[in-house]
Image: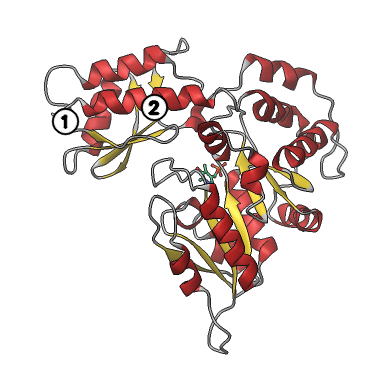
Amino acid sequence: MKGRGVSDFRSDTVTHPTAAMREAMATAPLGDDVFGDDPTVRELEVYAAELFGKERAIYLPSGTMANQVAARVHTRRGNEVILEAGSHTFFFEQGGLAALSGLQARPLTGERGRIPLEDLEAAIRTENEHFPVTSLIVLENTHNMAGGTILPLDYLQGVKELALRHGLKFHLDGARICNAEAATGIRLADWAATADTVSCCLSKGLSAPIGTVLVGDDDVIREARRVRKLFGGGMRQVGVIAAAGLVALRDMRARLVEDHRRAKVLAEGLNAKPGLAAEEPETNLVYVDTPKGKASAVAARFAEEKVLCIPIGPSRVRFVTHNDVDDDDVRRALSVALSEGDLTS
Ligand SMILES: *Cc1c(COP(=O)(O)O)cnc(C)c1O
C-alpha cells in the first residue's frame, strides 16, 4: 500500500518511479536531444533497438504520440488504416488518424483483440478509382480493452505475411508488449520481427514516469524524428527522464510475472462474490462484470475502503496490478469484495 493508505488498481500508469530510477535520473548525463546529443536518450534508444532487434529507436513523450507518428510515417493523406474496433488507436486517441494525418480508419471487430486473417484480407481495398488506398494495419499486443489479452506470435506472423503480400505496413501498438513477453517467455525481438514498427510504453507496468519508445528500420525512424518535431514532441535535456526509462526497460520487465500472478489471485477471489464475474486474466488487467448498470456503484463502494478501480462501462470495472500494489493490496481488495452485504447499495 506504499504508505499512501490507498490500494490503487485503476491503471498501471499510476506507478511511481523506483528508487533506482530516481538515482539514475539524478546522475544522468544530459544534452539537447533535438540536436541528437543527449547521451542518456541515445543510450536508451540504442538499448531499445537492440532489445527489439530493429535498426533504430526513437524516444517519445507518450504512447499516443508513438502510434500517431507511426501512422503518419507509414501512410499518405487519404489512405485507409485497418485496425481493431476496441484498440487504443481507434478508441482513445481523439480521432488522431483523421485529425493529424488525414487518414480514414477502418475498424474491424476482433476476437480477444485478434481480427481474423480472412476479415483482414477482405477489408484490404482493391485497385479502384473510387476507393481509398489501404496502406497500414495497426494491432495491439497485449490488447487492453479485450482484457490484456496476448495476440499469439503465429497469428502476428500471419498478419505480417498478409501485409507483405499486399504491400501494406504493419504497426504494433506494444504499449504492454513487455507483459506479453513476461507471460509467454517469447523475446521482444521475436514479437517485433512480425511488424514494421513497434511502440512500447515505459510508463505503464515498467513504472517510468513518462515515455514510449518506437522501434523500426533506420529510414522509418529518421522520418519519425521529423514527425515527432512536427507534432511538438521534440524534447531537450530529456535524458533526465529517459534515465528512468532505461532502468524500466532493463530491470522492470522480469518482475511483470508478479503482476500477472496477483491478477489471477484477484480475479479468482472476486469471482467468489455473487454478482461479480471476472474474466481469467492473461496478464495484468482484470475486467469484472458487475450487476447491470452497477459499475459506478461498485467502484464507489471499493473507494470507500480506499481500494480504487475504474468503471469501464455501465456494468464493468477494471482492476490493474502493477509495481505499486502488493499482496496486501490484493487481500484488502478481496476483503472488501467478500465482506457481508451488497456491493452496490
Ligand atoms: C496507454 C496506451 C497507449 C497510450 O499511451 P499514453 O502514453 O497514455 O499516450 C497506447 N496504446 C495502448 C494499448 C495503451 O494502453
* Residue positioned 53% across, 78% down in the render: 125
Q: Position of residue 69 (x, y in %)?
A: 66, 55
Q: Name the element at disc 2.
A: helix
Please identify the quadrant where the C terminus is shown.
top left
Quarter placement of the N terminus = top left
Sequence-wise first label, 1 or 2: 2
Total labels drawn: 2
The reply, left or right, for residue 339 in relation to residue 63 is left
Amino acid type assigned to the residue bearing label 1 in the image: Thr
From the viewer's perspective, is 311 left or right of 12?
left
| Percent coordinates x, y for residue 290 in the rendering | 21, 37
Q: Residue furthest bottom?
A: 129
Q: Label 1 crowding class (10 Å Cα cut-off): few <14, some 14-19, many 20+? A: some
State whether residue 160 is above or below residue 79.
above
Where is residue 283? Give x, y as percent: 45, 34
For marks 1 and 2, give the CA distance: 23 Å
Graded by Cα atoms within 10 Å as few (under 14), some (14 to 19) or many (20 or more), the crowding at tag 2 reads many
Say above or below: 262 vs 126: above
Which amino acid type corresponds to the residue marked 2 in the rendered image?
Answer: Ala
- What is the secondary structure assignment of the residue under circle 1? loop
Please name the residue shown 76% across and 57% down the image: 220
Q: Residue at x 68, y 42 (%)?
A: 189
Coordinates of residue 270 in the picture (x, y in percent): 25, 26
Q: In the drawing, what numbered circle is on residue 263?
A: 2
Residue occupied by mark 1 = 344
Asked if residue 276 lies left or right of residue 76, the reply is: left
